Amino acid sequence: MAVIALLVALYFWAMGEIFLDFSIEFLLERPPAWYYLLPFFWIILLAELYDIHRAGNWGDTVRGVAMATLIGLGFYLLLFFYFTDPPSSLLPRRGVAGFFVAAPIFTLIWRFLYIRIFTAPAFMRRVLLVGGGKAGQTLLRVIDNLWPPPFFLVGIIDDDPQKIGTEIQTHKVIGGSDKLLEIVEQETVSDIIVAISGEMQGSTFQNLLDAQEAGIEISRMPVVYEELLGRVPIRLLETDWILRSFVDQSRASEFYELGKRILDIFGGFIGVIFLLVTFPFISIGILLDSGRPVFYSQTRAGRGAIGYRILKFRTMHQDAEPDGVPQWATEDDERATRFGRILRRTHLDELPQFINVLRGEMSLVGPRAERPELVELFQQHVPFYRARLLVKPGMTGWAQVNFGYASTIDETVVKLEFDLYYIKHRSVLTDFVILLRTPFTVLGLRGQ
């Protein structure tokens, strides 16, 4: 759609030319080289919409496309007015305007067709859930809370005679494992999800093998949970999961670690430049609002629980914790100053952390840095919490762009599920996607 929008924009641009029509000569002479990269930039602006759940929601789609259009045009206008007398060939107004009119229209047309057609039941996978216990019920809650639904659930298989014929969260238990192959054929099942947390009967295992040999896709509940939510189901995992699955799969190659450090250094330098540019204005705002000091330093737990001093612009009143007891940051925190609330909403208070990134104490992408006292507290209530210390804390991260801040133990559990998913699946591409999505978090003013 972005490429089609580019062609349409070029055509209407050429129609306004006096000496050149829409021709090879026009395409070679008039548009600057960067203009042909607009479809690529448009896809980057839509990074927040390349999520299967947002893609199926018309309201999120419209808001995302509108935001991308405003950001794209805003960036162009910034360049246009920065160069006081830009050559028309370098920043073509007609061509750019044409693209940013056509691209949203064609994108919305395609997304509308996708939502109306490809999220319809006829195009969905037909899934059979094996297991109606705790794991199965957890997955059912996930499915019921997603819109559009990720697949069509034909029913549940469970060997408990008391459950057969009943409903679990509006989904019917249609038989035991002895009827599995028969149900697969009758309901034209395409996928089976196994949600059995205890021991599996030999007959059930054999029926699953037979179904797989017949071409049915077999998936385990934790894997599906990760695919649907981008999180790890920590409340359903046994202790040895860390050894069997997490530690083995989360080992990062030396190439990745080197690439990540290079990215951190490059991004850190850019961030420090931005910090130096904004420092006079932010410091004046802090001094006028609440006086000194401008900066705030606090001990945080880094990789391997090694402490370091994090740097931030001060956003709270002095002696915000007079009793010395650590407190969660909450929305509209009363401890924050008036100017501090603005800094938090826009995340400008975190700019000094680029210095921590250059020092190697933090990374651009990783779990959010926590105070050692809170780490000790969370370890007592949240399974596997210390596993998030396997990597450096980050200025942004998978949990930050998908969930935000946590102010309760239950929210901390959800956030940890995102953090562990990132550690398990981290890669240069994942880091790049998170960095692309971060500006939308900032523009959404979701800071606390």
Image (spheres, rainbow, N blue to C red):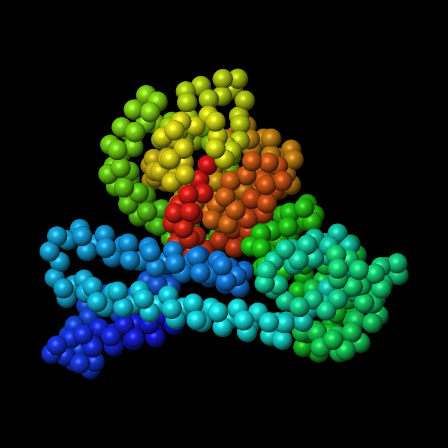
Residue 17 x %, y %: 15, 75
Q: Residue at x 58, y 30 (%)?
A: 376
What is the quadrant of the N terminus in the image? bottom left
Furthest-right residue in this view: 161
Q: Residue at x 18, y 62 (%)?
A: 91
Along the line of sight, the residue nearer the viewer: 119 or 142: 119
Residue 261 x %, y %: 37, 47
Q: Residue at x 83, y 67 (%)?
A: 175
Location of residue 153 by image quarter = bottom right
Q: Is residue 82 left or right of residue 221?
A: left
Along the line of sight, the residue nearer the viewer: 361 or 153: 153
Along the line of sight, the residue nearer the viewer: 309 or 66: 66
Q: Is residue 418 left or right of residue 156?
A: left
Residue 63 x %, y %: 43, 57
Q: Is residue 284 left or right of residue 238?
A: left
Location of residue 88 by image quarter = bottom left
Q: Residue at x 59, y 41 (%)?
A: 411
Residue 38 x %, y %: 29, 66
Counting the numbered discs, the total is 0
* Residue 196 shows in the view: no
